[in-house]
Image (cartoon, grey):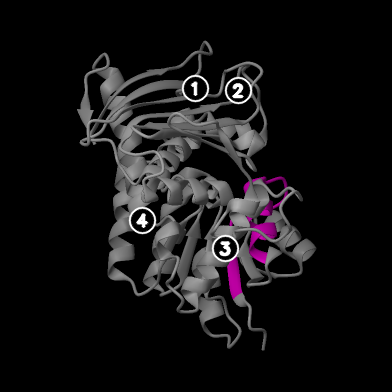
Amino acid sequence: MSTRIPLGMVGGGAGAFIGGVHRIAARLDGRFELVAGVLSSDPERAASSAASLGIRSYPDFETMLRDEAARPDGIRAVAVVTPNHLHAAPAIACLKAGIDVICDKPLAATPAEAAAIAEAAAASTARFFLTHNYSALPLIREARALVAEGAIGKLRLVQVNYLQGWLTDDVSSKQADWRKDPKQAGAGALADIGTHAWQLAQFVTGETPAEISADVSRIVPGRLIDDDARVALRYASGAKGGIWVSQVAVGHENGLTLALYGSEGALHWAQENSERLIHVPKGQPARILTRAQDRSHSYRTPPGHPEGYLEGFANLYSDIADILSGDLAHLDRVPGIAAGLSGMRFIAAAQDSSAANGTWVRI
């Protein structure tokens, strides 16, 4: 019998983007083996997609959980890679069945769904993981270590931007349509990329803002969901910050950037040049750090041989495999329910603040 962890998948059939990303990440380090799935709500498409991958196909997740439980080689974990409004039901069913869950972000489409997942996770022996992949990149983990060591001193300023331009026009595609539908996505840019920006700042700084003030907009005429948000942050420590997320910033492809300023220095990082971290000690020349200086060793190839987006997901899957095998050494660097609930509070607080003309709202 294979020593790899048998994995199931909900969503991610033909034409889906994120399902393929999860499949590549899960197998990259040989820790998981995808063996079963409910790859579409359309049984024919689900069966065709499963056949192309050589895995067992099921018409729904209830049947998959029941039938896999009766197999000696049945699934031990499930990746949920559906649109946001379809996260809760399979995640809750898996947790009740004692099956570990690896869920794409955000946690859910609504606060009620998020609370239901959290309740199921609290009552289950299974674990729940959320794939905020950018926080698994090597130099983000190094930035986190530098902040914890005091390399920039007391945190003063935080700025995270996540700028895209792909929804500048009223485009229609499989990836765009559900993201523009409030019933499926819950929120727009706030959920799709804003939760990444929020979690990244939390992960690196170790601090969560105490309150926020937001201006959330629908820039494209007729759009039913937010596509731009400017959020000011206040921390209990006295630090200030800002998050700007937009999917209508013409010319930007995936412009996720992080800048931290402390009493003794600064850190600068950009996702589109993710293998460079700039550390500026106060009064000294800037230091350009590469993966050669990453002490977490979250990579597979020698420094100078680029790794990126897919490998970030793979780092999470590798850490998750360690955790499921009983090695909890890196449990703190894998997002879970707490990160998911925090992201949902961020979305709700930003919406409430904007509706009240930027009133400061406690998180």
The amino acid on which the numbered mark 3 sits, given as a three-letter code, is Tyr
Which residue is identified by label 4? 337
Which residue is identified by label 2? 167
The first of marks 2 and 4 along the sequence is: 2
Labelled pair 1, 2 in contact (Cβ < 8 Å)? yes
Which residue is identified by label 3? 317
The amino acid on which the numbered mark 4 sits, given as a three-letter code, is Ile
Q: Tag on residue 278?
A: none
Q: CA distance from mark 1 to mark 2?
A: 8 Å
The first of marks 1 and 4 along the sequence is: 1
Q: Residue at x 69, y 61 (%)?
A: 300
Which residue is identified by label 1? 227
Labelled pair 3, 4 in contact (Cβ < 8 Å)? no
The first of marks 1 and 2 along the sequence is: 2
**Magenta segment, which residues?**
6-27
Looking at the picture, does residue 329 appear above or below residue 201? below
Between 268 and 340, the one lying in front of the other is 268
Q: CA distance from mark 2 to mark 3?
A: 30 Å
Labelled pair 2, 4 in contact (Cβ < 8 Å)? no
Residue 187 in view of the camera: no
The first of marks 3 and 4 along the sequence is: 3
Q: Position of residue 207 (x, y in %)?
A: 31, 43
Foreground mark, 1 or 3, reads: 3
Q: Position of residue 51 (x, y in %)?
A: 77, 65
Q: Position of residue 220 (x, y in %)?
A: 53, 13
